[in-house]
């Protein structure tokens, strides 16, 4: 029985097992997606597709979004025709991620047991399967490229079309595809040099095709290059975005990214404070995992294929822009790496030091050591289960906030939404006890809460949201100078004080003479955002004037911090 199972589990034949796995995957993703409420990023893409013009989507918005507009264009027909918001997002995302998983199941050379487990990896199942973002297409393109990699020299057009699709989806797709091309180009030059035909490299079809891809990428980079006032993760200008500073924590994150993509759950921010003990522990674990990966790919003569895109990716993340979900791209890269090794060699060559260790182990110890190879497969499945549980068990606030506004017809009144403010002083947070006395930089174009809510409405219900172009329901990732911010806020003042305020904000900044005691909190909505074994909690509070509170009559006052 044991030998029969091993024969089945490690067989590379495709068949019923793959079909059953695909069905289970699809049912699982659809079930969790039914409970998922879109986050800000998902809402932003839908809003762009719904209220942006083709010209804006192609030539203007990408400068602030930082990625090509393919995803927005795919959502455009659904959004423009008034299709259901949550359902349409889920259908488009599930379609592409299911294609990606199908390629993995029916085209990859992995043994059955590995193929059957991989689709339920946290990033393939939850982060890129349930959450509707363009990464589903990026993963599909990477898996197609893996399937074409073995014959890329004989059929370079197929392979480069896959890379072109990667570049069309996301900035990180450009990074990974660029890394592959750098290594491939080096191999081509090396081959011609070895054969004494270096002069013929300029007539090599593969080089000319890569040049065509490079020109395509240059056009994309021109399209997405940040505008002067693009706002990215606290950086308010394009000069700040590309102003690099490097420290030990950033160096550590180059290694931590690989840990996060495989078996670890590390702190969620580059700016996290570390104590000495945790810093040493993290460093040791991260370096060991990195060394293990490097030694495996070196033993299989694929080190540069992994290292070049990985290092470019990690440097971009640590120096320019990074969110934890981007780590899933490295998970896809690892799948790509083992895929092409198995495709070319039929097996994974273990480093000599691992072979020596395994040869010195016997009996149960040898079995335990072999079982360790399944940890990177099983831990991410546990993450998928945990995040799916949180997704089903706990609500995300956006839908509830929209329902509350509709229930009490608050959209018939003047609603002001919170906007981004950053303290001019170096403080722990703006909601400190002396928050009302702090001075802030105002970024009135940045209103995340409003952006996330607006897809549930047919039009813009916030009078201070995109006041210069009120029909636009997407957020402009743009900072404002103090003069520009004051001009926008002056336009808010002209509308008169709000009847409803979405989330706690500095109301006296807009209306200096207003009495914040005239507003009462009537609803607090908590957001639970799952990630692996944890869920981060945020909440927003809705305030109304006392006059409106008395007029409606059925609202209940809750205890909350006052506006200030």
Image (cartoon, rainbow, N blue to C red):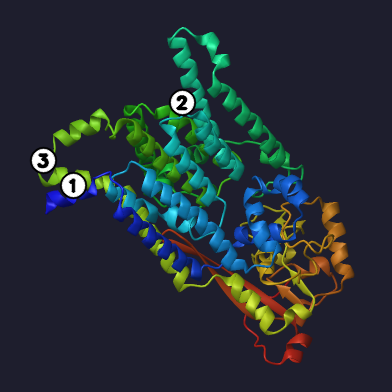
Left or right? Give the position of 267 relative to 382.
right
Q: Residues within 10 Å of mark 3 (few under 14, many from 20)?
A: few
Kindly indicate the quadrant of the structure image that contains residue 417.
Answer: bottom right
Mark toward the start of the polypeptide (2 vs 1) = 1
Q: How far is disc 1 from disc 3 in space, using C-alphas?
A: 22 Å
User: Are circles 2 and 1 on residues that touch, CB within 8 Å?
Assistant: no
Quote the CA–CA distance across marks 2 and 1: 34 Å
Residue 118 at what x, y percent from top left?
Answer: 36, 51
Can you name the residue that lies furthest to the top here?
196
- Mark 3: secondary structure: loop
Q: Is residue 236 visible?
A: no
Along the viewing direction, whichever of 34 and 364 lies nearer the viewer: 34
x, y (%) of residue 390? 44, 68
Residue farthest left in this picture: 363
Give the residue drawn at x 14%, y 51%.
Answer: 4
Residue depicted at 12% across the width and 47% down the height: 364
Q: Quadrant of the N terminus?
A: bottom left
Q: Is residue 531 left or right of residue 539?
A: left
Assess whether mark 2 and mark 3 are in contact (beta carbons under 8 angstroms).
Answer: no
Q: In the structure shown, which secondary structural element does the residue marked by tag 2 occupy?
A: loop
Which numbered tag is attached to residue 7? 1
Pick the residue in front: 66 or 94.
Answer: 94
Image x and y of residue 508, in percent: 80, 69
Q: Horizontal placement of 82 versus 254: left or right?
A: right
Would residue 468 appear left or right of 118 to someone viewing this image? right
Q: Which mark sits nearer the N-terminus, 1 or 3?
A: 1
Quick one: label 1, few (<14), some, or many (20+) residues within 10 Å?
few
In the picture of the structure, the residue carrying the numbered disc 2 is 153
Identify the disc placed on residue 362: 3
Closer to us: mark 1 or mark 3? 1
The quadrant the C terminus occupies is bottom right
Name the disc covering residue 70, or none: none
């Amino acid at each position: 029985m044991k030998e029969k199972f091993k024969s089945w589990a490690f067989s590379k034949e495709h068949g019923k097992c793959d079909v059953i796995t695909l069905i289970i995957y699809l049912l699982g993703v659809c079930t969790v997606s039914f409970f998922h409420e879109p986050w800000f990023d998902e809402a932003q893409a839908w809003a762009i597709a719904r209220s942006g013009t083709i010209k804006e989507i192609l030539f203007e918005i990408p400068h602030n979004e930082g990625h090509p507009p393919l995803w927005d264009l795919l959502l455009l027909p659904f959004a423009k025709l008034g299709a259901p918001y949550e359902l349409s997002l889920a259908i488009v995302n599930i379609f592409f991620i299911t294609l990606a998983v199908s390629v993995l199941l029916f085209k990859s050379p992995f043994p059955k047991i590995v193929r059957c487990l991989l689709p339920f990896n946290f990033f393939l199942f939850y982060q890129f399967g349930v959450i509707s973002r363009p990464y589903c297409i990026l993963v599909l393109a990477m898996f197609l490229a893996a399937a074409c990699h073995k014959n890329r020299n004989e059929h370079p057009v197929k392979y480069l079309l896959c890379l072109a699709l990667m570049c069309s989806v996301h900035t990180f797709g450009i990074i990974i595809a660029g890394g592959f091309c750098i290594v491939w180009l080096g191999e081509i030059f090396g081959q011609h040099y070895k054969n004494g035909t270096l002069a013929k490299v300029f007539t090599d079809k593969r080089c000319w095709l890569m040049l065509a891809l490079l020109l395509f990428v240059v056009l994309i980079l021109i399209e997405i290059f940040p505008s002067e006032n693009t706002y990215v993760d606290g950086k308010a200008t394009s000069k700040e975005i590309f102003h690099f500073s490097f420290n030990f924590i950033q160096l550590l994150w180059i290694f931590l990214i690989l840990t996060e993509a495989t078996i670890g759950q590390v702190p969620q921010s580059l700016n996290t404070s570390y104590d000495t003990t945790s810093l040493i522990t993290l460093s040791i674990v991260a370096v060991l995992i990195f060394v293990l990966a490097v030694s495996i790919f070196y033993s299989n003569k694929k080190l540069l294929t992994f290292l070049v895109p990985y290092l470019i990716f990690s440097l971009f993340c640590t120096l320019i822009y990074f969110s934890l979900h981007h780590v899933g791209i490295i998970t896809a890269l690892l799948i790509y790496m083992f895929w092409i090794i198995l495709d070319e060699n039929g097996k994974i060559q273990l480093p000599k030091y691992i072979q020596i260790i395994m040869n010195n182990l016997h009996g149960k110890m040898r079995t335990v050591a072999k079982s360790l190879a399944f940890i990177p497969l099983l831990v991410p499945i546990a993450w998928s289960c945990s995040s799916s549980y949180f997704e089903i068990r706990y609500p995300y606030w956006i839908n509830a906030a929209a329902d509350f506004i509709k229930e009490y017809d608050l959209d018939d009144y003047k609603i002001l939404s919170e906007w981004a403010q950053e303290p001019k002083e170096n403080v722990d947070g703006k909601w400190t006890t002396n928050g009302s006395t702090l001075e802030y930089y105002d970024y009135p174009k940045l209103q995340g809460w409003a952006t996330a809510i607006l897809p549930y409405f047919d039009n813009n219900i916030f009078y201070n949201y995109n006041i210069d172009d009120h029909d636009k329901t997407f957020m402009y990732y743009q900072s404002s100078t103090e003069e520009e911010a004051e001009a926008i806020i002056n336009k808010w003042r002209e509308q008169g004080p709000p009847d409803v305020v979405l989330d706690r904000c500095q109301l006296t900044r807009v209306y200096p003479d207003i009495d914040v005691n005239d507003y009462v909190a009537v609803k607090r909505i908590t957001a639970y955002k799952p990630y692996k074994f944890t869920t981060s909690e945020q909440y927003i509070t809705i305030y109304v004037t006392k006059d409106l509170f008395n007029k409606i009559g059925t609202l209940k006052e809750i205890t909350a911090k006052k506006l200030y």
